Structures are given as structure tokens and as C-alpha cells.
Image (spheres, helix red, strand yellow):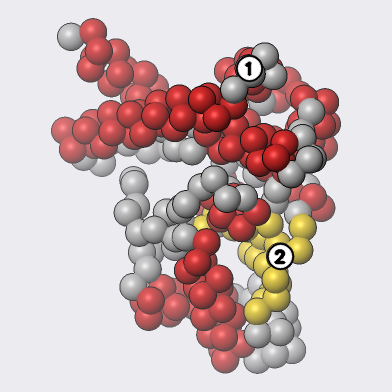
Amino acid sequence: MFAEKLFTKENLDNCLKELAKEFRKMNGNRVPAEIILIGGASILINYGFREMTYDMDAIIHSSGAMKDAINIVGDRLGLPVGWLNTDFLNTDSYTPRLVEYSKYYKTFSNILQIRTVSAEYLVAMKLMAGRQYKNDLSDIVGVLMEQEERGDALTLERIKKAIVDLYDSYERIPQNSRTFIEAIYEKDDLSELYEQCRAMELENKEVLLDFQDDYPEVLNGDNLADILQAAREKKFFT
């Protein structure tokens, strides 16, 4: 459930470079491929506050050779199965409109174009997910902090527009996420809020890891939130 292989800003490009070379060798150079990196990988590429991610969530537009290239490169570099995956397509955060609001990053081996998601659209996706056991909330605060430092602060109106662009309505995102993003704009110190969110996320992850040790093969994407709440209540009230 929780992988422990780290991707950093430094090694991410090398993995993509090796993937492009392998894909070109298998598929030739006539049919290009496009990968849109989202989530943690987009954070690493576009911002400096996050040091690592455990996998690369992506939208992949390519021939079938890409799947084989991913597996071959993963084996060669000692990466975990699913190091580059499209599991995100099965989540509520996915929308085909992300392609429209992605931005160019790099092209590797003249065959593989990489795009990312940033700024208000990345915040919109993180709000739709709103997971309290990963990096969603701290990532939102981190993006807001860095955008402000760059002189391109994200207003609540920009974020709401991005949510509408991607998901049709601001009300589509969970109520907890709406409460969270609106409360941020009442805070004076985002750096303190970032640390608080990160501490909560790490604590929640530990709670889930303990539960996973006690009850193997029970956790899944559908029950994580409910189990986290129940496990936290058991931990702190017994």
C-alpha cells in the first residue's frame, strides 16, 4: 500500500531519459509519445518545498510499447512495479480536461514529450483528492507559499475557477476540502500551517501502517478514509 522507493528532483529526469531511450529503441522514432505527470512528480518539477515522491502518477498517450518500456526501465534501475502508473485515471481527481491545462516540461530523445500540471490546477486536483494520509493538504499549502514568493499569488478566485474548469462546479470537491482552502486565506503564517499539515499527514500514515501490520490485505482505495478515522479513534481514545 505504501511504497518506499524515493524519486527526487535529481533522479526523476534520469528515469524519464532512460524511459525515452528504451521506448525509442522499441517503437522507432516515427510515433512520438506524451506523458502528463501529475501529483507528486509535478510538485517536484515545478516547486521546491517537496523533496521526494514515491511514484509517478501519469496520463500516458502512447503506443502499447510504452508499457513494456516502463517495465524494462524499472527492472534495469531497480524501481518498484508501478513506478510510472496510470492508477490516477481511476480516481475522482482525474478529468480528461487536465490535458488542456497541462504545460510543457521537456522532450527526451526527440520522442517523449513530458508535460506537468501546476499552480491553481494542481491545487484543484489536490483539493478533489483531499487525502489526509498522503501529501495533498501540505502540497496545497506549499504551492500557495511558493506562488506567493514568486510574486504570482493564487487567489481563492483563481482556484475556484480552476476547479470549475476541471470539474464543472466548485461544489464538486469534498466539503472538507472547501472548508480547508477557504480557511487558508484567513491564515497569516502559511509556513506554520504547512508544518502542521505535514505532521498530521505523517502521523496518519503511521496509523495506517500500524493497521496494515495488524490486518494485512484489508486496506484499499475505497476504505482508507473510514479505516483511518476508526484507527485514529481507537489509538487516541483507548
- Residue 222 x/y as whole percent: 44, 33
Q: Is residue 2 above or below residue 173?
A: below
From the viewer's perspective, tell me whether residue 32 is left or right of residue 196: right
Near-viewer residue (55 or 45): 45
In the shown orientation, is residue 43 left or right of residue 196?
A: right
Q: CA distance from mark 2 to mark 1?
A: 32 Å
Taking the spot 51% from the left edge, 25% from the top edge, the residue there is 192
The quadrant holding residue 62 is bottom right
Give SS at disc 1: loop
Secondary element at image label 2: strand
Q: Residue at x 64, y 18 (%)?
A: 188
Looking at the figure, which quarter contains the C terminus? top left
Residue 109: x and y in percent read 65, 85
For residue 187, the mark is 1
Location of mark 2 (residue)? 105
Question: Which numbered disc flags the more N-terminal residue, 2 or 1?
Answer: 2
Tell me, for residue 10, which label it has, or none: none
Q: Residue at x 79, y 28 (%)?
A: 155
Q: How would you rate the neighbour count of disc 2 (Cα within 10 Å): few for under 14, some for 14-19, many for 20 or more? A: some
Q: Position of residue 227 (x, y in %)?
A: 34, 24
Q: Position of residue 100 (x, y in %)?
A: 81, 53
Tell me the kind of residue under disc 2. Tyr
Q: Is residue 125 visible?
A: no
Specify the amino acid type for callout 1: Lys
